[in-house]
Amino acid sequence: MKLDELKKLKTQCLEWKNVKPWYDQLKQVLKIEKEHIKIELNDWVSIGEKDDLTPAEHELILQTAKTLIPWRKGPFNLFGLKIDSEWQSNIKYNLIRPYFDLKDKVVADIGCNNGYYMFRMLEDKPKRLIGFDPSPLTMLQFEFINHFIKSDIVYEKLGVEHLELYNHKFDFIFMLGVLYHRPDPVGTLKSLARGLNPAGEILIDTFMIDGEDEIALTPNSRYSKIPNIYFIPTIPALKNWLNRAGFTDIEILKTTVTTQEEQRKTDWSFEQSLEDFLDPNDSSKTVEGYPAPKRVYVKAKKS
Ligand SMILES: C[S@@+](CC[C@H](N)C(=O)[O-])C[C@H]1O[C@@H](n2cnc3c(N)ncnc32)[C@H](O)[C@@H]1O
């Protein structure tokens, strides 16, 4: 199927039975027009102030935000309504912030979710900013927020596997928290390499296990209660994957253990979060007995 046909099909999905109620709710919000509102792209992505809206508009914003639960990434403050997402994504953004400068670059965020990081990246004034994510719910969350921010970010309901078919290439590609969801991690990294301009760069993060051997953990079924986790490499294995996919100058930026400060239950998320995913008697293990989630952040150049 050609990319244009796929994009058309993906747009039609907004009228599908399970997605339509979210879309219909959002369409009401898209009628609210506000000019000259205050936008602050800080740890809380904040839009407008309480007095900018009528009581009826506040109610519509509240009902729409609730319809679009779960909010996994954020946080956002919409005219005083605090959407405290499951993940404090500001922690990841602040961790990677020292390692890029996007000024005048053509940038992609693959697996961009509701666009939280892209809103933060606007501070660098990239030439073009494009998010890829196949999830209709997160795209509607993005449209909800972006309706007021009015950025020219483009949100494509596409996956990393479509990157190499896209109508242009990128100078810088982020792919955060996606690699472990892919059954073919080297193929996925090759897709990133094919989506880059010469000398283009990537910044990714993935779950990792400790060790010097060039191996990866392959969970039996779930990992930390997540069903679609396929390969969790050691750092030497990850470097091999990147080399074999066509990357060089591989820089290990940081490793982190996920904390309950970063991922926790809130009124805006699912009923379970990190505290339910770890062994109650030993937080160094998941409920399945695997090493608890640890991430590695890596930057690399197209060779
Ligand atoms: C664990 S979340 C990571 C979100 C965000 N990048 C972060 O690091 O906080 C994984 C995201 O990848 C998206 N995703 C799922 N399949 C994908 C694919 N084939 N290509 C790109 N993204 C995908 C999901 O919808 C989800 O938003």
Image (cartoon, rainbow, N blue to C red):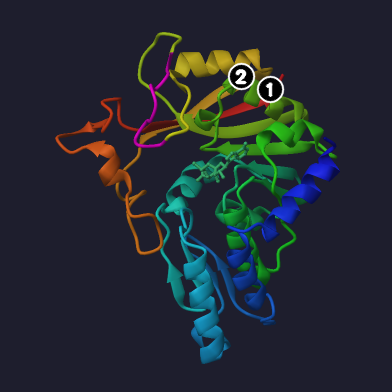
Q: Is residue 117 left or right of residue 260?
A: right
Q: From mark 2 to mark 1, how far is it between C-alphas?
A: 6 Å
Instruction: Name the residue rendered at 26%, 33% in the picture.
Output: 287
Q: Quadrant of ligand 1?
A: top right
Q: Position of residue 133 (x, y in %)?
A: 63, 45
Q: Residues within 10 Å of mark 1 (few under 14, many from 20)?
A: many
In magenta segment, residue 223: yes
Measuring from the top left, give residue 284's x and y in whole percent. 24, 31
Left or right position of 271 against 32: left
The residues colored magenta run 216-226
- Density class for disc 2 (Cα within 10 Å; few <14, some 14-19, many ≥20) is some
Verify CB contact (< 8 Å) between mark 2 and mark 1.
yes
Quadrant for the N terminus, please: top right
Q: Quadrant of residue 234?
A: top left
Q: Is residue 115 magenta?
A: no
Q: Which residue is mark 1?
A: 190
Main secondary structure along the magenta-highlighted residues: loop
Residue at x 59%, y 37% (from the top left corner): 175
Q: Which mark is residue 6?
A: none
SS type, badge 1:
helix
Callout 2: SS: helix
**What amino acid type is highlighted by mark number 2?**
Val
Q: What amino acid is at disc 1? A: Lys
Image quadrant holding the C terminus, namely top right
Q: Is residue 111 above or below residue 208?
A: below
Residue drawn at (56%, 78%) of the image: 48
**Residue 159 image position (x, y, % from top left):** 67, 38
Residue 284 visible at all: yes
- Spot the residue most to the front: 17
Q: How many marks?
A: 2
Residue highlighted by disc 2: 186
